[in-house]
Amino acid sequence: MGLTEQINDLKQQLGRDIPHETLKEIGQFVQGLVQTGIEKTSCQAGDKIPAFELPNVSGRMVSSVDILAKGPMVLSFYRGVW
């Protein structure tokens, strides 16, 4: 199964497991963000960001410079519980 098929399968699974009201709330939140135009001023894939330090899952501070010295880095922000 290719990545596209895996993503589509996951979307279908989430659609079954997430209550309709929750999906509606998420959709309204996303539409609110779209209406602000935030995507036009947000970082885009491939953009360069300044060096930074953040705590890892263990609370230890890690440097983006150190991570990038080893290869590509993915930075993900978790909003938390919807």
Image: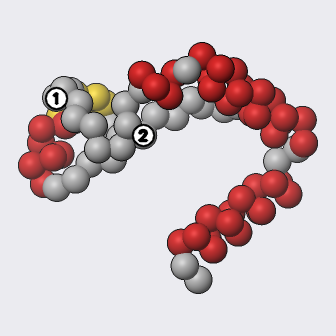
Tell me, yes or no, if residue 76 can be seen here. yes
Is residue 71 depicted above or below 52 in this figure?
below
Which residue type carries mark 2?
Answer: Ser
Q: Identify which residue, 18 or 24, lies in the foreground.
A: 24
Q: Identify which residue, 36 or 30, lies in the foreground.
A: 36
Are there few (<14), some (14-19), or many (20+) residues within 10 Å of tag 2? few
Is tag 1's residue or tag 2's residue first in the polypeptide sequence? 1
Measuring from the top left, give residue 23's x and y in whole percent.
81, 40
Which residue is drawn at the image coordinates 23% and 30% (left, top)? 49
- In the displayed orientation, state which residue is furthest to the top: 36
Which residue matches tag 1? 51
Which residue matches tag 2? 76
Quadrant of the image for the N terminus? bottom right
Which residue is drawn at the image coordinates 46% and 25% (left, top)? 40
In whole angstroms, how far apart are the C-alphas of marks 1 and 2? 15 Å
Is residue 27 depicted above or below 1 in this figure?
above
